[in-house]
Structure formats: structure tokens, C-alpha cells
Image (tube, helix red, strand yellow):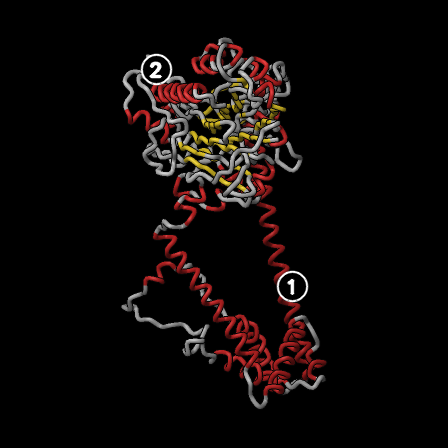
Amino acid sequence: MVKIVTYNVNGLRPRVAQHGSLRRLLDALDADIICFQETKLSRQDLSADVIMAEGYEAFVSCNRSTKGRGAYSGVATFCRVTSAFSSQEVALPVAAEEGFTGLQDYSKNSEIIGDFIIATPVEEGLGEITREDLLRVDNEGRCIITDHGHFVLFNIYGPAVEENDKERVRFKLLFYKILQKRWEHLLALGKRVFVVGDLNIAPSSIDRCDAPPGFEKQMFREWLRSMLRENGGPFFDAFRSKHPERTGAYTCFNQTIGAEEYNYGSRIDHILISGACLHHCDFAEDHSIFCCNVEECEIMNHFKRGNSENLSKWKGGRSSKLEGSDHIPVYILLKEIPEVPVHNIPPLAARYLPEIRGRQQSIVSFFNKGKTSELQDAGNLALYKDTVDDSCCSDDLENKTTAKEGLVAGITEFAKGGNLSSLMCKGTNLDQWKNEGLAGISRGSQKTSPSGTKFVPNKKIKRNSSSQPTIKSFFQQPGSKAVNVSTTTFVTPVKTLQYMNDTCVSNSLQENMQGTTSASEDQDNANVSSCSLSEDKCNAAALEWQRIQQKMKMTLPHCKGHREPCIPRSVKKGPNIGRLFYVCARAQGPASNPEANCGHFQWAPVKSKEKRS
């Protein structure tokens, strides 16, 4: 069995953080080939924690567009393998290619699968298409192709465009028309083609909740349906072919309206397959790879946001976003897939990228590495100090060690509230404690480093205002100065005992102890009072904020469907930009569900300029 999963992660780093590690995320999907879309990673963002996982090999494509949108789009294919070399596993590709136009000059390790050469014109009605137009299609990091011997796998993240954006509509049309030519070229060579990913197209009304009239007449939906077998195309829609009558099967939900709560979504994540079966027979209707080698295709609904009781539910408002992606994974299970000839991992694999191997370094990483070395040297120095302390030989070593042990035990017990007089009765003299403690500290401050220089951790280097700082000072974190733990531990108790001994000459030791205990209790009482006062202030602030919120709710209009307070929103673009309006606060759902959003809309009143002045 070979399992393939497609999943729009809506940012790979957030999904890795959500699961704890990349390995845990991949293991949770439990598949041989895992295709991610919308990774939102640029080449500068690539690092081992989001690309490399034990037992998996990765192939990535990142956005190279210079439109100033930052990191967006991006796809990644992860293959679960036991070995990357001399392997016969189907999951390990025999070849890999970034992009699909065949013009990827920027990727030296990428190879053109099937020797594809694009022919022009691509499509009538698109006008003149330049080489720059074709390269722009690949530069957004929307496709990675892997050849697995028995089939060629396209991991696709299709563009999402608005109908009034003519430039992006043309881009999307060019994107899919070139893809179609690439698919047809491979099928003509006798290859089996698998297309998985977020195509951003819901093909039919059954694939969209409350589809409006004329839904299926949209240009891209018509194109996708033309590629399917029932309409004369070469591809099977694996999920719909397995479940032709299933309704409410959606893979994407609007994260700003709480669409998951009432299953108000669309099915735009697809698995399309085409080609002959693996039985070495002539291609026929009942001998396609779908009919003979597809065991199951299903939506992994347990990945839906808010599905678990531990996750918070949507509570209305744009700030109420659930943890997780706004998409749900889809998987296909293949059966009777034989092994492939022995092969090695293709050179396009992520393990060979300079960003992962470390051959290319930025100036920031260079200085971070220096700081790491300094921390390691400091740790070695501290370890050396401990070794010197333990191995120091002198005539009175045993006496000094016994005195130090008594000092440590005595101060520890005193700090815990022990009786000082009882400690003194054990044969430990206060002066001996002070002398041994101070002597130990003095000796500790005069230890030498392995290089022979004296190590004085608490001594500050004095500089004149005109002295020139070193370059290292610009990269030191504030507040990161080393602290001698042993000195910090002993100085305060010793000073406290010194003060007690000097000020209590005329009084008995028991009276001193009682006075100290009383002072400690007074300090504790003062701390408790301070904490209580602070808690009272916090409670008062919380109550005041609740009162303000309640007052705000009283001023908000109520929706007509549920008679509940609306939520305020503002127009983001257009002639009414910035204008406030109110809508129903409930999550969006089917129109037939009375518990879902009632569709209430109301403009907020606008004060005239005369009243404002």
C-alpha cells in the first residue's frame, strides 16, 4: 500500500509549532508521500527544523516573486523512506523538478521530467506571452514535480484571484493552461499523472455549501470539469469518483466567519489521477489506474479546526481564529504498487540546499556562531573551576572541607527557618562560619583560568567615557553578564550573620534569634498585604473592564434573526473604506440552519461634519 496526503497547511511553521515538531506533524498524517501547500517559506526562511525530519526526504519550492508581499504560497513534498540511497521504495523519487514550465534557469539541480518544451502560443485570447510571463508562473513557488517511477506526482498550489483583478485572472489562466499542456505531454509519453493539492477551484455546486445560481458557469470551474473523465477529459476526481453522491464534503473553511462550526465550506483540495493500470494490459475503461489500483480516497475530518474538545470554539469577530489550518487534508490509498529499480535521491532534495547544509552563511549567523563558542568556552571554564576546587591539595584540606560542609548546612538550615542556637550547640562557631565562608570566597575569586589569567567573575572592567568598545559589545544581549553562583549563595548569609554578631553583643543569642524571627514575620506580613492590595487592584480593573464591555454591548444593535448583540466591523476598501457596520455575531452556516448566522447587516450612523464641529 502507498498512501499519499495533500494538505494546505496555511503556514508550515505554525503547523510545526502546533504539533511540537516537524516529525510529529508528518507522523500524525501517517503517509508515504505528504504534499504541503501554502508553506509561506522563502529561501531565507528555510531551516532544518521545518524541512528536515528523521525518516523523511523533502523537496521544496519557494516564492521568488519581487512583488513585496513577503513569504507566501510555497509547496513542499515529504517522502517517508528508510534509505535515500540504493533504494527500491516507491516513495523515494527517481527524479524531481521545481516548477512546470521547463524554463527554471534558477535551479541548477532541477531536471525536466519528460523533456518538456513549451510551445507557443499557449492559448488563444491570452495575447502575446513572453519568456518573463512564463518564468513568473514558476517564480511564485506553486509546483514541485516528483517522478516515482510508476507515476509522476504534481504538488500544486493554485492561485486564488478576484474576478475584477484582470492581471491575476490572466495569470491564473496562463498557470492552468501551461499545466494542462504539461499533463498532456506526459500522458502522451505513456506516463501516469497524479495531480494533488489546493487548486482553489470547487468544480461543481455539490462541492460548495449554498452555491449561488450560475456557480458552475465560472471560467475556471468549467475548465476543471473539462479535465475530468465524465466530460471527456483524462483525469479521475478520486474523491468524487469514490463518493459521487456525498454532500457536505468540504476541505476549506473561511477562518474569519467560523465556517467550521456549521460545516460551511467548499471542496477545493483535490486528487486527480490519470493513466493505465499496473497490470501491463492495454488501456481500457475498466483497466485504468483508478479502477485497478485505488483502494480509497477520503477527507481527514479529524484535522478540522475546533473538532477537539480541548480547542476553543469560534466566538465571533475577526480576532477569533481557531488554532490550525483553514484546510483539511485529503488522502488516497494505492494498492498493488510494485517496487521500482534501485535508485538514489535526486539532487533537488532539500538535504542538498545550501540553506540546509550550511555552506551559505549570513553575517548574522556568523556572529551567532561566535556567541555560541563564547558560551561553550565559558561553560568549559566553569567546569575547569569545579575540577580545580575538587582536586586542590593542601595540608588542611580535610579540616577546610569539614568547615565548608558545616557552613553550607548551617546557612541552609538557617535560611529555612531553623533555630540558630541549636545550630551553635552542634559545635559550630559563628566566627568560624564567617571566617571560613569569607576565606572560601576569597580563594574562589583568585582561581586562575586554564590560560593562566586570573578569573574574577564579579569584578567590573572600568572604562573611561572616551574608551572605544570592542565589536563584540554590539552583539552582547543586555542583562547577560555572568553571575558567580557560589558567591551569590554565600555573601548574603555571611553579611547577615556578621551584622547579627556585631549588633548583639549585650544581648543573649536567644533574644537575637527571637528578634530576627519577629522581623521576618513582619516582613512576610508586609508582603502579604502588598500582594492583597495588588490583587484588589487587579480585581477592580477586571470589574471595570467588564462593566465597560457590558455597556458597549448595550449600545450595540441586535440582529433580527436571534435578537443578540451584533459585532462591529469596518469596510477595508472601496468608496466606503473605514466606514463602520454591524453584522450578526454567530458563525456562518447554511441558510437552512436557524442557529447559524442570520445575515443581518446594518450601517453604523455617521455623524455629520456640522455636529462634529
Distance (Cα) linking label 2 and label 1: 83 Å
- The image position of residue 22, as x and y in percent, is 54, 42
* Viewer-proximal residue among 284 and 457: 284
Dot 1 falls on a residue whose secondary structure is: helix
Dot 2 falls on a residue whose secondary structure is: loop
> Within 10 Å of the Cα at label 2, are there few (<14), some (14-19), or many (20+) other Cα atoms?
some
Locate the N terminus and report the quarter of the image it occupies.
top right
Which residue does the image show at 42% across and 44% down from the upper left? Answer: 352
The numbered dot on residue 123 is: 2
Which residue does the image show at 59% across and 14% down from the upper left? Answer: 286
* Viewer-proximal residue among 233 and 95: 95
Locate the C terminus and report the quarter of the image it occupies.
top left
Q: Which amino acid does label 2 sit on?
A: Glu
The mark that comes first in sequence, 2 or 1, is 2
The quadrant holding residue 109 is: top left
Which residue does the image show at 51% across and 31% down from the upper left? Answer: 8
State the count of labels.
Answer: 2
State whether residue 517 appears in this view: yes
Q: Report the side of 72 relative to 484 (left or right).
A: left
- The image position of residue 599, as x and y in percent, is 55, 18
Which mark is nearer the camera, 2 or 1?
A: 2
Q: Report the side of 21 relative to 158 (left or right).
A: right
Residue tagged 1? 525
- The image position of residue 86, as x and y in percent, is 51, 42
* Viewer-proximal residue among 269 and 441: 269
Which residue does the image show at 54% across and 18% down from the upper left? Answer: 237
The numbered dot on residue 383 is: none
- The image position of residue 561, as x and y in percent, is 60, 17
